[in-house]
Amino acid sequence: MRRKGRTVIVYHHQGRMKGGNLIELSSLCDRIQVAGGYRPSYVVRALRGTTRAFLIFDGTEHDLEVCKALATRWPGNYSWHLVSDLCGTRR
């Protein structure tokens, strides 16, 4: 699936992992790295209702700016996170 110049977006419906959704995302990113050898650059979370996450692999600067704008425009509905920041949320 990975190709140079192609952004890959993976959808994940978040569960109820002990410790919360950010810890679940950190764990998921770690498992993807172990299994596939790479990790997403950043994550967009949809917060209304049940939480959903969109893991962005090989995203461009433009993709990141679009994700930031989405979270800024609807702060109670969306958030974005650098995966490097999520790694610090694991217990």
Image (cartoon, rainbow, N blue to C red):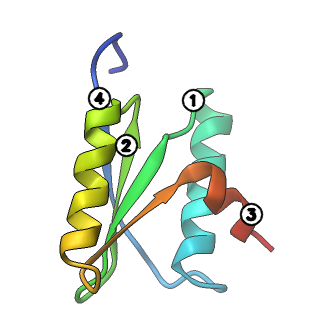
Q: Are marks 2 and 4 in contact (CB under 8 Å)?
A: yes
Spatial distance from mark 1 to mark 4, Cα to Cα?
Answer: 16 Å
Q: Amino acid at mark 3?
A: Gly
Kindly report which numbered mark, 1 or 2, lies closer to the viewer in this rendering.
Answer: 2
Secondary structure of the residue carrying tag 3 is: helix
Spatial distance from mark 4 to mark 3, Cα to Cα?
Answer: 25 Å
55 is higher (above) or lower (below) than 45: above
Query: What is the quadrant of residue 77 in the picture?
Result: bottom left
Secondary structure of the residue carrying tag 1 is: helix
Residue topped by disc 2:
56
Q: Amino acid at mark 4?
A: Thr
Question: Nearest the camera: 61 or 18?
Answer: 61
Residue topped by disc 3:
88
Q: Earlier in the sequence, mark 1 or mark 4?
A: 4
Spatial distance from mark 1 to mark 2, Cα to Cα?
Answer: 14 Å
Query: What is the quadrant of residue 59 in the picture?
Result: top left
Question: Which disc is residue 7 wearing?
Answer: 4
Q: Amino acid at mark 2?
A: Ile
Residue 64 lies left or right of residue 18; in this view the side is left
Mark 3 burial class by Cα count in 10 Å: few <14, some 14-19, many 20+: few
Residue topped by disc 1:
36
**Residue at 29% of width from left, 46% of height from top?**
65
Mark 1 burial class by Cα count in 10 Å: few <14, some 14-19, many 20+: few
Q: Position of residue 60 (x, y in %)?
A: 33, 30
Spatial distance from mark 3 to mark 1, Cα to Cα?
Answer: 21 Å
Q: Position of residue 57 (x, y in %)?
A: 41, 35
Query: What is the quadrant of residue 34 in the picture?
Result: top right
Q: Position of residue 64 (x, y in %)?
A: 34, 44
Q: Earlier in the sequence, mark 3 or mark 2?
A: 2
Residue 22 lies left or right of residue 13; in this view the side is right
Mark 4 burial class by Cα count in 10 Å: few <14, some 14-19, many 20+: some
